[in-house]
Image (spheres, rainbow, N blue to C red):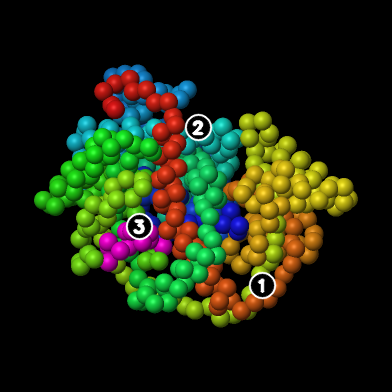
């Protein structure tokens, strides 16, 4: 059950220097957060007092207006009990057009782009609504530190980053709120999707067996992705309509139209408004449906036929391929058999109340008036609750850095104080430790991560589809 503490890995190279854009900054933050959730623990440089003072001064400056005053801020879409305004749509269109042009991609027609952007705003709003319902909040201090980390990763100052963002036509105040939303969406996906992906020992065995007889895996690929989503429980007529849309995009691609432009116009994937680029991934972490098709592409720049999955229709383009060197691990490492109780803040229970409850549970366990496993079954907010919170044997790197750091300090049978991670607040108890040869255990851990990565995209798309299908959405203009 240690999958609760894992995140899917992906590799990407961020642009540095002064030539920053809103899209690259957003991408950098999301990758940084994802890496931290996986346990790769990207280094966060603690801001010095002068940097914080500079940030405070920067935030006091007025933001430039980016939308003309004659735009009527009427309602474009009602999403559950909230609205998306026409001004929000107009601002997003302007931002995406600038971003695509900066990438060297001509934007699709305004009508096509508006349809895509409205749908993306709906999906984003639904994720943020769910996050708020579950009590998630990104306070200003957390946001400021994320922005500082972005500036450091891009080797620039806060002021230079702000200047570039505003030169690109986006107000810094709006940019801050976009980052706040990005962090919140990342966290709700971790909680609702990644933490629930199951990887069985049989799947690990099958993966290792297939890898043993397969050709060399020492390659990674940069892929482009166009996905036309099919709603859950779609009728044959709707499936035919979605297939026709995919066929239309494919026909345009075959006569030479730009893939990135078509992705922005047709794709329902999360990468659509970035031109469909997924980024670099190791071969074994790409779903077999896609990898089998990519292996048939004879040159970089080629693309697949239309592929069908349970989530919809797909076209994959090979944007790049490069060798990657793997180093076999042979050292002896410590494994830890551990269990936990995890709870999260909600609208009905604040973070402070959660920590107080966990401290009360700890006292009962230590006083032997209650058993750890019984409390976990009744209160833990994860799929390990039914097993008394048992996460099994954890290998170094399997968990969040904060979780592992606290776990490694515990004596056997000792219960920790509440430990906060991106998954919530944990009480941790170590049951046993052992030393083992790293090579075999590491192979299984890597195989487990690869299987998880293969499942991750489908799981995310399926969750977003269900989220969208369950929502009340009312269009107040021509968008449908």
User: As rendered, which of 307 and 260 lies closer to the eye?
Assistant: 307
Q: x%, y% of residue 403?
A: 65, 57
Magenta span dominant secondary structure:
helix
Question: At x 77% / y 48%, what residue is drawn?
Answer: 374
Region of the chain picked out in magenta, as a range: 285-295
Q: Which residue is mark 1?
A: 334
Disc 3 versus disc 1: distance between alpha carbons?
33 Å
Mark 1 and mark 2 residues within 8 Å of each other at the beta carbon: no
Image quadrant assignment for residue 46: bottom right
Number of numbered discs overlaid on the protein picture: 3
Mark closer to the chain start, 2 or 3: 2
Tell me the number on the disc at residue 129: 2
Image quadrant assignment for residue 172: top left
Disc 1 versus disc 2: distance between alpha carbons?
41 Å
115 w.r.t. 189: above or below: above
Report crowding for label 3: few under 14, some 14 to 19, many 20 or more residues within 10 A (C-alpha).
Answer: some
């Amino acid at each position: 059950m240690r999958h609760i503490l894992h995140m899917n890995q992906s590799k990407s190279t961020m642009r540095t220097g002064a030539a920053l854009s809103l899209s690259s900054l957003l991408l950098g933050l999301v990758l940084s957060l994802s890496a931290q959730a996986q346990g790769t623990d990207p280094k966060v440089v603690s801001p010095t007092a002068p940097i914080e003072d500079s940030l405070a001064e920067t935030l006091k400056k007025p933001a430039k207006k980016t939308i003309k005053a004659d735009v009527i801020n009427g309602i474009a879409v009602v999403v559950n009990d909230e609205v998306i305004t026409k001004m929000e749509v107009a601002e997003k269109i302007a931002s995406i057009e600038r971003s695509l042009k900066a990438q060297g991609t001509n934007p699709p027609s305004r009508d096509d782009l508006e349809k895509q952007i409205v749908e993306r705003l709906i999906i984003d709003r639904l994720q943020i609504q769910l996050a708020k319902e579950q009590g998630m909040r990104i306070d200003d201090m957390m946001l400021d530190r994320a922005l500082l980390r972005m500036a450091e990763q891009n080797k620039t100052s806060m002021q230079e980053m702000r200047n570039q963002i505003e030169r690109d036509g986006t107000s810094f105040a709006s940019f801050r709120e976009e980052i706040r939303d990005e962090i919140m969406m990342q966290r709700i996906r971790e909680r609702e999707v990644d933490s629930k992906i199951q990887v069985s020992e049989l799947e690990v065995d099958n993966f290792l067996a297939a890898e043993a007889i397969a050709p060399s895996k020492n390659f990674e690929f940069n892929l482009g992705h166009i996905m036309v989503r099919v709603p859950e429980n779609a009728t044959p007529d709707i499936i035919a309509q979605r297939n026709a849309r995919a066929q239309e995009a494919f026909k345009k691609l075959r006569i030479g139209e730009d893939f990135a432009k078509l992705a922005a116009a047709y794709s329902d994937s999360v990468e659509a408004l970035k031109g469909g680029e997924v980024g670099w991934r190791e071969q074994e972490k790409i779903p077999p449906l896609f990898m089998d098709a990519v292996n048939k592409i004879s040159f970089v720049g080629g693309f697949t036929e239309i592929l069908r999955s349970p989530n919809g229709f797909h076209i994959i383009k090979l944007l790049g391929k490069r060798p990657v060197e793997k180093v076999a691990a042979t050292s002896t490492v410590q494994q830890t058999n551990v269990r936990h109780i995890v709870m999260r803040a909600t609208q009905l229970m604040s973070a402070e109340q959660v920590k107080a409850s966990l401290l009360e549970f700890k006292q009962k366990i230590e006083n032997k008036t209650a058993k750890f496993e019984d409390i976990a079954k009744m209160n833990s907010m994860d799929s390990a609750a039914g097993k008394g919170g048992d996460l099994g044997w954890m290998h170094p790197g399997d968990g969040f850095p904060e979780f592992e750091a606290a776990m490694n300090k515990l004596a056997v049978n000792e219960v920790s104080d509440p430990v906060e991670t991106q998954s919530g607040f944990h009480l941790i108890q170590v049951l046993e430790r052992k030393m083992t040869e790293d090579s075999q255990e590491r192979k299984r851990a890597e195989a487990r991560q690869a299987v998880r990565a293969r499942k991750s995209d489908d799981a995310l798309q399926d969750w977003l589809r269900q989220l969208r299908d369950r929502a009340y959405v009312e269009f107040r203009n021509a968008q449908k």
